[in-house]
């Protein structure tokens, strides 16, 4: 399998082929994602909630993101990997944005980075792209600014706010982003953005009229317990499965059914008497 390039992604848009991607944060999950043929993997800062148990993504650090990107890169060498820039890694200054985007590439070998925001982060998008890196935009529900949005809420549900999203999308493309992610926005708004932009426009919770779809691994696997957004389809309940396995293991140990004979090592010379001398 050959890793996709930005041109493959662009060609898929032109051909009307939907691109499928998922988040992954650890080695095992990323291995399964690559085996299953995911077009892209996002090492999302949603790892703050899914791996570290924070209420949101704001506490996530650069070092945490880099560590998880490294693990995912090792597990999925043939998959296009996007590193997610955490809160405060690109907002403070253009210089810091370029340096941090560069860290994702130099230290973790990602193929692209993603950052949240519209017009207000376009100087950063331009500078990172000018640095020779692939930048993906992210608009709509942007969890790093959930305080300003009043929580994890769908966006662009009025004509006025939809117009703002459309102009943010155009500005992001003009700034040099290679793709855009639209989160939790009505499908008709995402469709307009998809049709207006020449770069690929991907959806998470923004309907089927996009150039591809993203889901969070912990949501589709049924592992994330805190809440399930409306746009999530849970394909399995692995959380309950994991709990069941742990309960069976505990019961086996407590009743001494585990370990059994086949889980133990045999003495090589069989002369136990020597030990007992
Ligand atoms: O961090 C993440 O997983 C994301 C998606 C929810 C869009 O940015
Ligand atoms: Na994110």
Image: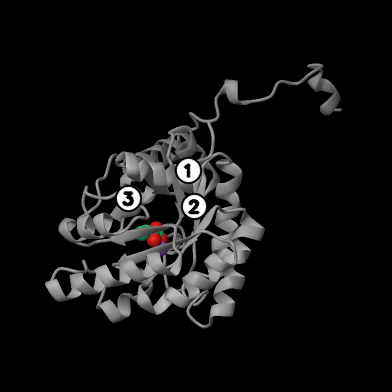
**Which numbered disc covers residue 25?**
2
Query: Is 205 displayed left or right of 201 in the figure?
Result: left
Which mark sits nearer the N-terminus, 1 or 3? 1
Q: Is the residue under label 3 in contact with that under label 2 (CB below 8 Å)?
A: no
Residue at position x 38%, y 64% from top?
173
Residue at position x 51%, y 50% from top?
81
Residue 139 drawn above or below residue 214: below
Which mark sits nearer the N-terminus, 2 or 3? 2
Q: Is the residue under label 1 in contact with that under label 2 (CB below 8 Å)?
A: yes
**Which numbered disc covers residue 176?**
none
At numbered mark 3, what does the secondary structure look like: helix, strand or loop? Answer: helix
Give the percent coordinates (x, y) of residue 100. Answer: 58, 70
Residue 133 drawn above or below residue 3: below
Crowd class of label 3 (few under 14; some 14 to 19; many from 20; radius 10 Å): many
For label 3, the residue is 219
For label 1, the residue is 29
Residue 107 drawn above or below residue 76: below
The part of the image, by quadrant, that contains residue 68 is bottom right
Instruction: State the CA–CA distance, disc 2 to disc 1.
Output: 7 Å
Q: Is residue 205 visible?
A: no
Q: Is the residue under label 3 in contact with that under label 1 (CB below 8 Å)?
A: no
How many numbered markers are drawn? Answer: 3
At numbered mark 1, what does the secondary structure look like: helix, strand or loop? Answer: helix
Residue 7 drawn above or below residue 197: above
Q: Looking at the image, in which quadrant does ligand 1 appear?
A: bottom left
Q: Is residue 183 visible?
A: yes
Instruction: State the CA–CA distance, disc 2 to disc 3.
Output: 13 Å
Crowd class of label 2 (few under 14; some 14 to 19; many from 20; radius 10 Å): many
Instruction: State the CA–CA distance, disc 1 to disc 3.
Output: 13 Å
């Amino acid at each position: 399998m050959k890793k996709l390039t930005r041109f493959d992604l662009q060609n898929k848009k032109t051909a009307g082929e939907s691109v499928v991607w998922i988040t992954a944060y650890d080695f095992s999950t990323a291995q399964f994602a690559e085996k299953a043929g995911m077009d892209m993997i996002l090492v999302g800062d949603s790892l703050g909630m899914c791996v570290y148990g924070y209420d949101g993504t704001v506490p996530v650090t650069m070092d945490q993101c880099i560590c998880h990107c490294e693990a995912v890169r090792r597990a999925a060498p043939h998959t296009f990997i996007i590193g997610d820039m955490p809160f405060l890694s690109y907002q403070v200054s253009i210089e810091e944005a370029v340096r941090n985007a560069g860290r994702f590439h130099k230290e973790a070998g990602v193929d692209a980075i993603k950052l949240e925001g519209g017009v207000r982060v376009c100087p950063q998008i331009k500078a990172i792209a000018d640095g020779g890196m692939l930048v993906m935009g992210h608009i709509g529900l942007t969890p790093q600014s959930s305080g300003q949005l009043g929580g994890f809420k769908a966006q662009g549900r009025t004509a006025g706010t939809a117009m703002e999203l459309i102009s943010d999308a155009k500005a992001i493309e003009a700034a040099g982003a290679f793709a855009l992610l639209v989160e939790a926005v009505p499908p008709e708004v995402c469709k307009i953005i998809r049709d207006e932009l020449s770069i690929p426009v991907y959806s998470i919770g923004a309907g089927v009229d996009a150039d591809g779809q993203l889901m969070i691994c912990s949501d589709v696997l049924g592992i994330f317990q805190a809440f399930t957004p409306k746009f999530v389809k849970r394909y399995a309940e692995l959380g309950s499965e994991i709990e069941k396995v742990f309960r069976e293991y505990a019961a086996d140990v407590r009743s001494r059914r585990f370990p059994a004979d086949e889980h133990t090592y045999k003495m090589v010379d069989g002369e136990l008497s020597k030990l007992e001398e």
